[in-house]
Image: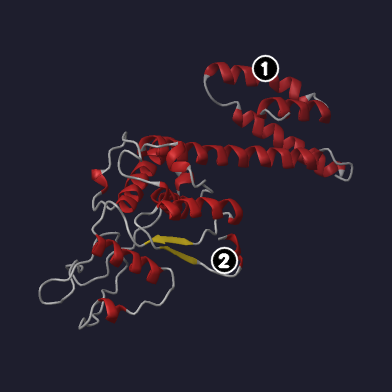
Amino acid sequence: MRWLLGEGVTTFIELGPGSELSGLAAETLALHNGPNTPAMIPLMSADRPETEQWVRALAEVHASGVDVDWALLFPGARWTELPTYAFQHRHYWLDATGTTANRATDGAPAPVPKTPDFAALDPAERERQLLDTVRAATAAVLGHTDPAEIDDDRGFLDAGGDSLSAVRLRDRLRAVTGLDLPTTVAFDHPTPAGLARHLADRFFDNAAGSVLGEVERIEAAMVTDALPDTVRTTAITRLRALLDRLGDGDLADHRAAASADDDLRDASDEELLAYIDKEFGIS
């Protein structure tokens, strides 16, 4: 399969009674190809009627960029125009006359749903919205029409998931959150509530890593001999002002910061950098 991937194959179809090989193949190729894992599509599934699963599989093949001759599957069928508004993550039905359903009632385009900026949310709201996101993604990969059908505390395997649906869940969450997630994330954190907490922690870790990375960058710039004295003095003044601002908090923290102000103002460059190292936890 790695050889086929190297030859440019981007879609794999499993011809068999289940989806086990697709899940194993996705995990294998993810180890060698990172986030650019090709599409893995089984034609059969133990939990769905054969005809339904075949149509679903061919739709996935079509969505993966492969040409499908739909006339062979639906002889006598005709093409119809879809609505021009954005897809709203819900089923699209045709009524008995063949006209489109789910049309905006006032004729105006429906609003395009926006992906939240999870990193900008406060922790409680971030976890809540991530839980909604996990529910919706889990419902989609397990074939539910309503995310409310997903139990927050029920394990992914207990809810009917397998290795392939775990990979698909990972792909959906990675696309929405932008996080680099392993193929086993649904097994490592098997409940929607646990997975949402893990994603929330990842955003917190990313924010913390970004802050500490900036501190390390400033530290490296400050200790270089090439830094002019005027720039160094200005930077130290601004760092002292920042430390004063960070001292604003409860009374104990404020008093501790105030008592350290005199020492900081008289500190040498080396002592100031050592203080920053201590405060930000840089070793």
Name, please, the residue furthest toward the front: 16
Task: Work out whether 23 lies above or below 91.
Answer: above
Q: Confirm whether residue 176 shows in the render.
A: no
Rate crowding at label 1 as few (under 14), some (14 to 19) or many (20 or more) other CA atoms within 10 Å. few
Percent position of residue 126, x then y: 41, 41
Identify which residue is drawn at 40% across, 77% down. Answer: 67
Task: Work out whether 271 lies above or below 237.
Answer: above
Q: Which residue is mark 1?
A: 259
SS category of the residue bearing label 2: helix
Identify which residue is drawn at 45% across, 46% down. Answer: 118
Residue in front for this viewpoint, 223 or 83 = 83
User: Label for residue 89?
Assistant: none
SS category of the residue bearing label 1: helix
Indicate the amino acid at tag 2.
Answer: Leu
> Mark 1 or mark 2: which comes first in sequence?
2
Alpha carbons under labels 1 and 2: distance apart:
67 Å
Percent position of residue 198, x then y: 46, 37
Quadrant assignment for the N terminus: bottom right
Identify which residue is drawn at 40% across, 54% down. Answer: 115
Q: Which residue is mark 2?
A: 4
Q: How many marks?
A: 2
Identify which residue is drawn at 29% across, 61% down. Answer: 53
Asked whether the beta carbons under mark 1 and mark 2 sit within 8 Å of each other, the answer is: no
Percent position of residue 196, x then y: 41, 39
Quadrant assignment for the C terminus: top right
